[in-house]
Amino acid sequence: MAVPLRFSTPAPSSRLEEIIPGSDRIEELSDSSGEYEDMGTATVEEQAHIAYLNSVRIPITDSLETATSRMDDKTAEIILPFLEGNPDGFTLNTFGIPKLQRESHAGALEAFLGDYPARVAFMDASRPWIVYWALQSLTALGIDISAYQKRVAHTFSLAQHPDGGFGGGYGQLPHLACTYAAILSLAMAGGTETYETINRKTLWHFLGRMKQADGGFTMCPGGEEDIRGAFCAVVILSLTNLPLELPPDAPARKRGLTSFTDGLGEWISKCQSWDGGISAAPGNEAHGAYAFCGLGCLAILGPPKETLPKYLNVPILINWLSSRQCSPEGGYNGRTNKLVDGCYSHWVGGCWSIVEAATTTGLWNRTALARYILSACQDEEAGLRDKPGKNSDAYHTCYNLAGLSAAQHQYKYDENVNKGLGTGNLGAAYHWKTEGVYDGKNNVWDEGDVVKTIHPVFVIPYMSVYEMRKYFEEKEGF
Amino acid sequence: MPKFYHDDEAWADIAPLPQDDGGLHPLAAISYSDEYSEAMGYLRAVMAKNEYSDRVLGLTEHIISMNPAHYTVWLYRANTISEIGRPLQDEIAWLNPTALKHMKNYQIWHHRHTIIDALGSADGEAEFISSMLEKDSKNYHVWSYRQWLVKRFDLFDKPEELEWTHSMIESDVRNNSAWNHRYYIVVGGREGKLSVELAKQEIGYTQAAIRKAPQNQSPWNYILGILRAAELPKSTLKDFTCEFADVQRPEEVYSSHALDILADIYAEEENSKENAAKALELLATKYDPIRANYWNYRKGLLDQPNIAA
Ligand SMILES: [Zn+2]
């Protein structure tokens, strides 16, 4: 798909020269994986992996062939060698699973923040995303990003639009996705000077112009209305602690709305699809990335225990989310009958903390997801990817690591956490805590493979979330 | 050949606004080509004075050819078209090859939506969409656009729409996007409850699809959606579901999805909790073990009152 927010980002280095068209690369890989299996001498570890894979496989296969089943088979053939063995020769952890390759990923991430050649002009409107993905990934790996503080502030001050909000870069129109990436990056960079680069008054007006009479938000002036808009808007409103009342010049006021939250929960409700998932806009197909946007939005509107059952059919939502986990790969797909993809490790994997906060814990298979990420999504050279045969990029690195964090850490909603914070507007999401690292059946990670905790709703470190909100709670006026 | 504006007489009156990166070096900076850099400088200049003209249209086309993901340029182009009154048919004709080249691009689809909305006619759009889906039969933008078209031009009752959707399901019964579209035209996009009569028709249609490939989840989900919309109980499907799974014969299960539904059907019955538990147990241990936690959670719910999903 075009997941929202996605495009392929070649690494800004000599690797650009090596990019081979996808299909050729897949051919190449399936050939070599065939050879690999023919060697026939499975190590003890490999035998254990193969036994595990057989133990989680659905033992039913329909004989009818369609384009979907052909694609599934072809993809499994490419992925399975990476789950059974170690074709890239990574160092293994005590479970015989590739270790998290911290150094090489960190190197790729530093490069993602560096300069790009002219031929990637197609990324010109997505630079805020790259900065967010790379910074978030670095913090997930536990790397100090304070050296970037001033450059983050500078980069986004150039992208801030005089009429409010942030665009992709200097002179570009404001866009909710760019603004979301900008606010999260500025929060991670931290510090009073950084926060003060945000013009909150014009930001408030920009968000007011995005609010629609039906309760949702458009992404940009004259742009599409979808659930990314709803999520991005409440994340921004909440972190910068803006007034909930619509600015006087907001067009939705003419249609009788007075608050940013008017009709919003109801609009999200209309995005729940017939199969239980959540779609981009009412009537569209359920999709993992939009599911996270919808749940994230509801988790900011109020405590999940209240907002999820109020606006969604929770049992069918859980059934749908659960069905996204692919067997035997363990990773997630984004839609029914689509392929497993590392970015859904977060988009779907990240939904569970919010859903469990509304129901009960222990609903999903954390270790199967971690296995897919560590075994199949680490690029031989650096960075993380969709699946074997695809190039790594900043987007997949960020969301694989966020998914790994969701699998490894137990994030709990607790109203008694941070009682002094988030008492005002859209404050529910400031009451999350981490209850230790998960340790269960079929575990696949050592201590060295554990990434840092990540706030389950804002998808940046907890401290970045608290500090920005606190700063703007204490600030008077705009 | 790169195109430049500084030596073009038609642009002599415009002083470009160059990108100012002031002070520190920005993160993820692109070393733009001179051509891209200059064109963007002229765009910023015309945007600053709100110029809408034929030459601006040409400028946006030039930038889009270098960066089709540039939403600012698309939005400004849409405004230009409306301000100068460019014939909308011409715009669509220009757009078609561009769209085929960049199918996963949000901006192109939104632009098309804007133009077709203003044009007020969906003529030719169905054929265009079909040609796009031939290249990528599950493209999210294309299907979402189709749903918008159905709503904008009220095509819900047009027989061709349902026939086309049927043909898409026929060609790949696992295409969930096609099932979603069917739901949209039969139920989702309409107001009000689904009649029992229409529900029965849809149930029959879907059962035939399930028989072709019982482990395909799309039609199972679809049939449950239809039941919910018509407010019919899941037990409506009991006999049908038992064709694919029977808890008394655990070796002969042809669909894990049938077990899932059976569990709910038994849970709603008076004295069948044990059978419900058996179905969930089979899922957790044998037929869908990767989701064992979920099935066990469902089993735990059996002991609680009012579990109907
Ligand atoms: Zn992906």
Image: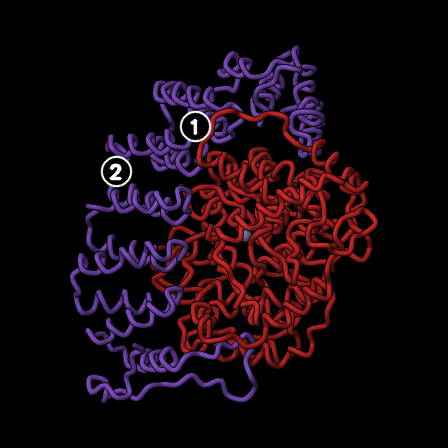
Chain colours: A red, B purple
Please tell me whether residue A320 is drawn above or below residue A346 in the rendered image. above
Question: In the rendered structure, which amino acid carries the disc numbered 1?
Answer: Ala
The residue located at (55%, 41%) in the rendering is: A310
Question: In the rendered structure, which amino acid carries the disc numbered 2?
Answer: Leu
Can residue B65 be spotted in the picture? yes
Instruction: Name the image quarter holding residue B189.
Output: top left
Query: Mark 1 falls within which chain?
Result: B
Mark 1, ligand 1, within 8 Å: the answer is no
The residue closer to the viewer here, A7 or B53, is A7
x and y, in percent, of residue A346 in the image: 61, 51
Tell me the element at label 1.
Answer: helix
Q: Which residue is labeled 2 in the image? A: B155
Q: Residues within 10 Å of mark 2 (few under 14, many from 20)?
A: some
The residue closer to the viewer here, B33 or A46, is A46
Tag 1 and tag 2, C-beta contact below 8 Å: no
Query: Mark 2 falls within which chain?
Result: B
Side (left or right) of A21 relative to B13? right
Tell me the element at label 2.
Answer: loop
x and y, in percent, of residue B309 in the image: 57, 28
x and y, in percent, of residue A169 in the image: 46, 75
The residue closer to the viewer here, B280 or A184, is B280
Q: What's the CA distance linking mark 1 and mark 2?
A: 20 Å
Q: Which residue is labeled 1 in the image? A: B229
Q: Nearer the viewer, mark 1 or mark 2?
A: 2
Please tell me whether residue A471 is drawn above or below residue A399 in the rendered image. below
The residue located at (30%, 54%) in the rendering is: B113
Please tell me whether residue A316 is drawn above or below residue B125 in the rendered image. above
Can residue A357 be spotted in the picture? no
Quick one: label 1 or label 2, which is nearer the N terminus? 2
x and y, in percent, of residue A91 in the image: 77, 56
Q: Residues within 10 Å of mark 1 (few under 14, many from 20)?
A: some
Side (left or right) of B282 relative to B105? right
